[in-house]
Amino acid sequence: MKTSNPVAAEPKWLLVDAEGQNLGRLAVKVARILRGKDRATYCPNVLCGDHVVVINARKLEFHPTKHRRKIYVKHSGYLGHLKTFSLQQMIDKRPTVMIELAVKGMLPRNRLARQMLKRLHVYADAKHIHEAQQPVSFSLTK
């Protein structure tokens, strides 16, 4: 089996608009791009994915009952320090973390996944700081 050279895989910058998208379907497609599975030179042990800039994270669409049913859990490791957040609280306070956690759950659990997550850039609104990289607009309806 021929493996690709990590230097030869030049990462592109893709811009994804999350407005009106479903969280799970968005996360699947973003994780696929971060891993590089959409490239012909995909190799599972090489970082060959692209940079992904996700904008409008606050404008994701959810089923009406999911706002109160979905719970995010965080634990510090100390007794009694279990914190829970509903989906509505996450949308109001930390909308970017929702997408980061969903994408993180769809990546492999290894050192390469941590490098892939560094290539994910999520913003709550349409403004982002990656204009200089000239990200190409990417449609998720394929």
Image (spheres, rainbow, N blue to C red):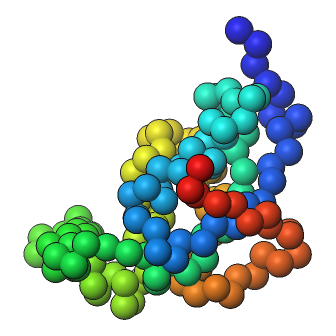
Please report the residue visible at 80 percent of the width from the left and 53 percent of the height from the top. 12
In the rendered structure, the answer to whether residue 48 lies left or right of residue 117 reads: right
In the rendered structure, the answer to whether residue 48 lies left or right of residue 99 reads: right
| Figure check: 70 above or below 116 | below
In the rendered structure, the answer to whether residue 92 lies left or right of residue 96 reads: left
Q: Position of residue 10 (x, y in %)?
A: 85, 45
Q: Is residue 97 visible?
A: no
Residue 128 quadrant:
bottom right
Please report the residue visible at 63 percent of the width from the left and 66 percent of the height from the top. 16
Along the line of sight, which residue is nearer the eye, 12 or 77? 12
Residue 6 quadrant:
top right
Q: Position of residue 106 (x, y in %)?
A: 43, 47
Along the line of sight, which residue is nearer the eye, 38 or 133? 38
Q: Is residue 44 visible?
A: yes
Q: Position of residue 7 (x, y in %)?
A: 87, 37
Q: Position of residue 4 (x, y in %)?
A: 79, 25
Quadrant housing the N terminus: top right
Residue 68 quadrant:
bottom left
Residue that lies at the very extreme toward the top in this rendered image: 1
